Image (tube, grey):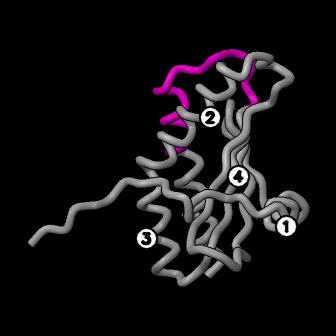
Amino acid sequence: MVTKQRYRFGKEDKLKSRKLIEKLFTGGKQLNVFPVRAVWLTENEFEQLQAGVSVSSRYFKKAVDRNRIKRLMREAYRLQKNDLQLALEKQNTRLSVFFIYNGKELPEYKIIFDCFSLILKKIIKSVDAKN
């Protein structure tokens, strides 16, 4: 019987802890793939994989625009995170990752999706190389 993959981004998958976010930005690794920057840390003490997204209000004054970009980023991550999750289970590690949108204009979904695929592949390589 073939098992069907679940593509979900539930409450337990969201990065919310202020302590963990602060720890992430002080000691995490960074990766830039324009227009998204990823910061990750493999010393997560909570869930197997947690993620957060952010958009600066400096370039996007309207909350509607910021929320749309965050929605696009979460959707691209949700559809592609299974490979990362499998790699983490194989290595028996935990990971926290935070995505920050750095562009100055509203992106199309395809740009965000391609950017996330590159970022997640590089993070998987980094996790595999560490162990």
What is the CA distance from the residue labelled 3 to the residue labelled 1?
26 Å
- Observer-nearest of 115 and 1: 1
For disc 2, the neighbor class at 10 Å (few under 14, some 14 to 19, many from 20) is some
The disc placed on residue 86 is 3
Could you tell which of marks 3 and 1 lies nearer the N-terminus?
1
Residue at point 48% right, 40% down? Answer: 75
The disc placed on residue 70 is 2
Dot in front, 2 or 3 = 2
Residue at point 41% right, 54% down? Answer: 8
Residue identifier under label 4: 98
* Identity, as a three-letter code, of the amino acid under mark 4: Phe
For residue 118, which quarter of the picture? top right
Span colored in magenta? 102-117
Dot in front, 1 or 4 = 1
Q: Secondary structure at mark 4?
A: strand
Q: Is any part of residue 128 visible from this angle?
A: no
Residue identifier under label 1: 19
Q: Secondary structure at mark 3?
A: helix
Q: Position of residue 84 (x, y in %)?
A: 49, 63
What is the CA distance from the residue labelled 4 to the residue labelled 3?
19 Å
